[in-house]
Image: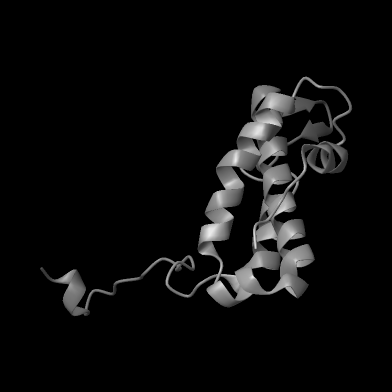
Amino acid sequence: MPITVPRARVKEKCGVTDSAYDAIVDNLIAEQVPVIEAALSVEAAADSALLPTLTLGATEVVCGELVAQIARSEAVFFHVTLGDVSVRPVDVADPSGLIARGIARLSPYFRTDVAPAGPTVQTAGSPEANP
């Protein structure tokens, strides 16, 4: 079952009111949604009861990507200090936290063969550390 992320919903969640970002939103939807769909298990993708959850997760990922692009283009990551007031940079990879929230919402439904794995740690005594 295909996931549909409407441009209007992305703009609403991101607080975008004009059409300046329409092409960017459309490109992000076209880029992100197929990747998300491909990562879902066959069972999850076929379960119509999960569609609202999957759509919300995908929408959050697209929104987070849009907010990150806007943050990078607006240079909101500069550190400024004026006297006792300091403004620190935001996480420009996911300044709104929406990508992480979307991935967390979707992760129970990802295929196990494509789920992101954590980094591997090699200790000095492990065979992998000694070529």
Q: On the picture, is 117 further left or further right than 83?
A: left
Image vertical order of residue 75 relative to residue 9, above or below: above
Q: Quadrant of the C terminus?
A: bottom left
| Residue ID at (21%, 79%) | 125
Residue 21 x %, y %: 74, 25
Between residues 46 and 62, which one lies in front from this camera angle? 46
**Quarter of the view holding residue 15:** top right
Residue beneath the point at 13% across and 71% down:
130
Q: Is residue 106 visible?
A: yes
Give the quadrant of the N terminus.
bottom right
Q: Position of residue 124 (x, y in %)?
A: 23, 74
Q: Residue furthest top?
A: 20
Q: Foreground residue, 75 or 109?
A: 109
Q: Quadrant of residue 86?
A: top right
Q: Position of residue 55 (x, y in %)?
A: 74, 58
Colouring style: one colour
Residue at horizontal 84 percent and vertical 32 percent from the top: 84
- Using residue 38 as the reference point, say whether residue 16 is left or right of it: right
Point out residue 108 in the picture as x, y percentages from the top left corner: 63, 75
Most foreground residue, 103 or 29: 29
